[in-house]
Image (cartoon, helix red, strand yellow):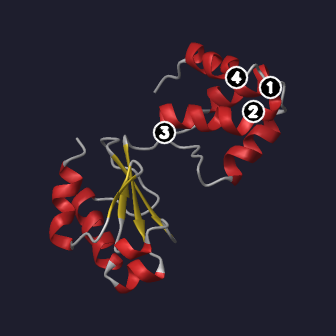
Amino acid sequence: MTIDIDRIDQIIDMHQCEASSLIQVLLEIQGENHWLPKEALDRVSEKLQVPLSRTMHIASFYKAFSLVPKGRHEVHICMGTACHVRGAKRILETVEDLTGIKPGETDADMKFSLETVNCLGCCALGPVMEINGKAHGKISVSETAAVLERYE
């Protein structure tokens, strides 16, 4: 995977190369690439004049950032109390079976990355599976495959 340095420069320039924009710049790069490659972190540090150690600290501290490649579709299964009592564990097991990956992993095709979360903030819709930020609520085991198939 190669990183588009020109695009990174554009993102940084949109924030007037302000060091105070570090998190926002990283979020935008993450949004486009699904992860933060080392080359991108180096470039951000250089252009924002922020020590690489600080950039790495931020990128590794926040769960929103990934230092490893992610799939094109990020699947989050809520395991919070409301979702748990409504069968979230069965939804997770079904997604694991269908994709062949466990939480924290990405499939070989770079299609899906799977994560569990403690709450997605829509407890009344439990169990909830979120894909690319879109919540699929009151999902059943039998509906799980059909929802995943929509994300090609």
Q: Is residue 76 above or below residue 140?
A: above
Between discs 3 and 1, the one toward the N terminus: 1
**Is 105 or 29 nearer to us in this picture?**
29
Left or right: where 55 falls relative to 98? right
CB contact under 8 Å: marks 4 and 2: no
Residue at image location 68% in from the left, 31% down from the top: 41
Q: Nearer the viewer, mark 4 or mark 2?
A: 2
Left or right: where 99 falls relative to 131? left
Q: What residue is shown with label 4? A: 43
Residue at image location 31% in from the left, 81% down from the top: 87
How many other residues sit within 10 Å of disc 2, few (<14), some (14-19) or many (≥20)?
some
How many other residues sit within 10 Å of disc 4, few (<14), some (14-19) or many (≥20)?
some
Left or right: where 14 falls relative to 120? right
CB contact under 8 Å: marks 1 and 2: yes
Give the distance between the C-alpha atoms of the residues marked 1 and 4, in whole angstroms: 14 Å
Left or right: where 110 falls relative to 140? right
- Disc 2 on helix, strand or loop? helix
Q: What residue is shown with label 2? A: 21
Residue at image location 16% in from the left, 57% down from the top: 146
Q: Nearer the viewer, mark 1 or mark 4?
A: 1
- Disc 1 on helix, strand or loop? loop
Q: What residue is shown with label 3? A: 34
Between discs 4 and 2, the one toward the N terminus: 2
**Residue type indicated by callout 3:** His
Residue at image location 76% in from the left, 38% down from the top: 55
Between discs 1 and 4, the one toward the N terminus: 1
**Residue type indicated by callout 2:** Ser
Give the distance between the C-alpha atoms of the residues marked 3 and 4, in whole angstroms: 17 Å
- Disc 4 on helix, strand or loop? helix
